[in-house]
Image (spheres, rainbow, N blue to C red):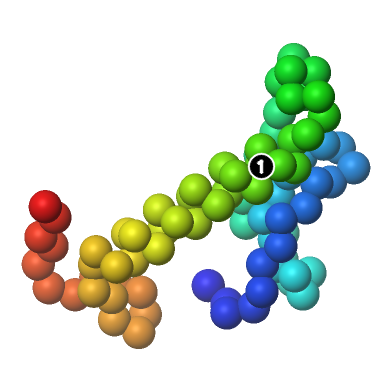
Amino acid sequence: MSSSFLEIVELENGEVVLRRADGKGGPLVRIEFSEESKVFLNNQMIEVGKAMMGAGLSMVGEMYDLYEMDENGKEMGDRVVH
């Protein structure tokens, strides 16, 4: 993945997306809330979406730390998970 900056935005249709800040390509992640969820969240989907994506990005960071990768993103060597 490119090293460009990422942004979390709420689109006009109510989806919360993670996308490249430079506008290249489509969204990397989409979160769509049901109408029932929107009512329950009092239309604060962006805050919930930020928390969900933040948790996901943290997990990706942890996974990256667990496995040594080569310059092409391929795993190298044995995996040991405790």
Give the x, y percent position of residue 39.
Answer: 80, 18
Q: Tell whether 8 sits left or right of 70.
A: right
Residue at horizontal 57 percent and vertical 42 percent from the top: 52
Amino acid type of the residue that numbered disc 1 sits on in the rendered structure: Gly
Give the x, y percent position of residue 79.
Answer: 13, 62
Up/down of 43 relative to 64, above or below: above
Q: Which residue is mark 1?
A: 49
Residue at horizontal 10 percent and vertical 60 percent from the top: 80
Q: Tell whether 42 sits left or right of 61.
A: right
Question: Furthest-top residue in view?
Answer: 36
Up/down of 30 relative to 23, above or below: above
From the viewer's side, name the closer residue of 44 and 22: 44
Q: How many marks?
A: 1
Give the x, y percent position of residue 16.
Answer: 73, 44
Residue 10 visible in the shown view? yes
Q: Tell whether 81 sits left or right of 72.
A: left
Q: Give the structural element (helix, strand or loop) at label 1.
A: helix
Quadrant position of residue 73: bottom left
Q: Tell whether 32 sits left or right of 72.
A: right
Up/down of 21 relative to 62, above or below: below
Residue at horizontal 78 percent and vertical 53 percent from the top: 9
Residue 27 visible in the shown view? no
Give the x, y percent position of residue 74.
Answer: 29, 72
Residue at horizontal 66 percent and vertical 67 percent from the top: 6
Q: Residues within 10 Å of mark 1 (few under 14, many from 20)?
A: many
Question: Furthest-right residue in view?
Answer: 12
Quadrant position of residue 36: top right
